[in-house]
Amino acid sequence: MDPHGLRNARSFQDAKILFHEEIKRIEREELIDPSVRLESWIISPTRRADLEHWSDKGNPQAFLEHHITFMYDDPEIYISQMLEFEPVNV
């Protein structure tokens, strides 16, 4: 988990955001133990509204698919969003 703001990131193509894909590649290709699961999430203090230009009006699902949660927009659920997230293409 990397708790940082996202105002300086330009899009979902930012290297820190894409790290969730790289860590899954490492899990698939380099880990010997199949019982180990690697994940990477950003818990952002930046408000979703400040980044709504990244997706269709700040669509919460688009951010979850890129492993981004918002601690101030979703204070009651941001932890459960990470723990319960099921990727579409596993």
Image (cartoon, rainbow, N blue to C red):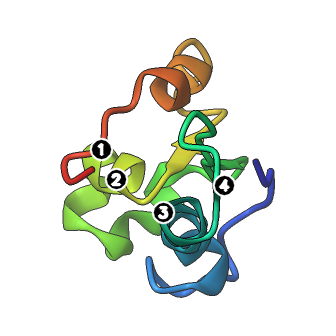
Say few, some or many: other residues with alpha carbon within 10 Å of mark 1 (under 14 / 14 to 19 / 20 or more): few
Marks 1/2 in contact by CB < 8 Å: the verdict is yes
Q: Give the residue displayed 42% in from the left and 60% down from the top.
A: 66
Q: Position of residue 80 (x, y in %)?
A: 52, 17
Residue where numbered disc 2 is placed: 65
Disc with the residue nearer the chain's start (1 vs 4):
4
- The residue carrying mark 3 is 28
- Find disc 1 in the rendering and name its residue: 87
Report the residue at 52% width, 71% height from top.
29
Q: CA distance from mark 3 to mark 4?
A: 31 Å
Q: Nearer the viewer, residue 90 or 64?
A: 90
In front of the other: label 4 or label 2? 2
Q: Image height check: is 47 above or below 8? A: above
Disc 1 marks a residue whose amino acid type is Pro
Q: Position of residue 1 (x, y in %)?
A: 76, 47
Identify the residue under disc 4: 46
Q: Does residue 62 appear to the left or right of 38 in the view shown?
A: left
